[in-house]
Amino acid sequence: MTKCGYVAILGIPNAGKSTLMNKIIGVDLSIVTHKPQTTRNKITGIYTDRDSQIIILDTPGIIEPKYELQSYMMKEVSSSVNDADTVIHLIDITQPRLQDQLIIIEPYRDFLRRKKTLTVLNKIDEISQSELERKISEISGKSLNDELIPVSAKYHFNIKKLIEEIKSSLPESNFLFEPDELTNRPERFFVAEIIREKILELFEEEIPYSVFVEITEFKDRKGNGSFISADIILDRETQKAIIIGKFGSALKQLGTTARISIEQFLSRKVYLDLFVKVRKNWRKNESFLKRKF
């Protein structure tokens, strides 16, 4: 009998949730940057082998919401935990106050009591063995379960062991997706995510978290790749000037970098058209968020 189930990954921003999902399924689906709160939506990745199918829900980092977009993101977390058969609590072992990462999941305790849980300690490559042992001692008996699984998602350390632990926690079930499927998200979703990733990478601290990418047109040209048009929506005019750059140089660089990554992801030629628009306070606009997310 095969096993199949949903697995939600919970943790603080930048704990490595997206990196972990990417490593498990073997493909970069969820964008990864050094900026916190990069993941906004519940992103589904699918790992399938001969006898098991793991449907992974990569969630936004858990925070105290301060505006509508962040409230939406926390609803995505709650939805993921509710849907999951198994929950991974991913702890960033490099953080000084591990207790804070235990406290932050308290709002989800009622959900978690009904789930199988795994506590995973990430980024062990960044600390010494003695420090790892001290931190394990610090949280032993206080986490969701007794067994703590140390990993380095970045360097793929102990990921095979984690996959086996996840598989053992899944219910017996037929597969819900075809064996070659890696996600249930449409291509246009990932194209928008790739463009947003390149914005965060290229403009570093100049463009904050307040950027939204909307795919306005996505057409396949028979035998000649795809035509994609996207709007880059920002909070302020000053940000628009940065994205466009002098004589459009920055926007051109962004378009080239994003197009190359999109072509690699889609495995076909792409013509990419980018437009930069300003919509003030879009993150706080509930009607806008309901339409776009």
Image (tube, rainbow, N blue to C red):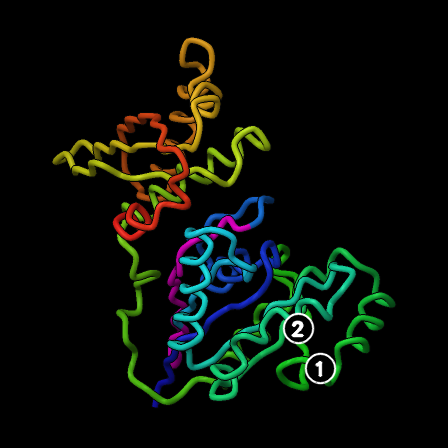
Task: Say left or right for 139 vs 177.
Answer: right
Q: Which residue is mark 1?
A: 142
Residue at 30% in and 45% down: 288
Residue 51 among those drawn in magenta = yes
Is disc 1 surrounded by few (<14), some (14 to 19) or many (20+) residues within 10 Å? few
Residue 47 among those drawn in magenta = yes
Helix, strand or loop at label 1? It is: loop
Q: Which residue is mark 2?
A: 102
Give the Cα separation between the discs numbered 2 and 1: 8 Å
The amino acid type of the residue labelled 2 equals Leu
| N-term mark: 2 or 1 | 2
The amino acid type of the residue labelled 1 equals Lys
For residue 27, above or below residue 46:
above
Is disc 2 surrounded by few (<14), some (14 to 19) or many (20+) residues within 10 Å? some
Cβ atoms under marks 2 and 1 closer than 8 Å: yes
Q: What is the span of residues highlighted in magenta in the rendered image?
A: 37-54
The foreground one among 272 and 178 is 272
Residue at 54% in and 81% down: 109
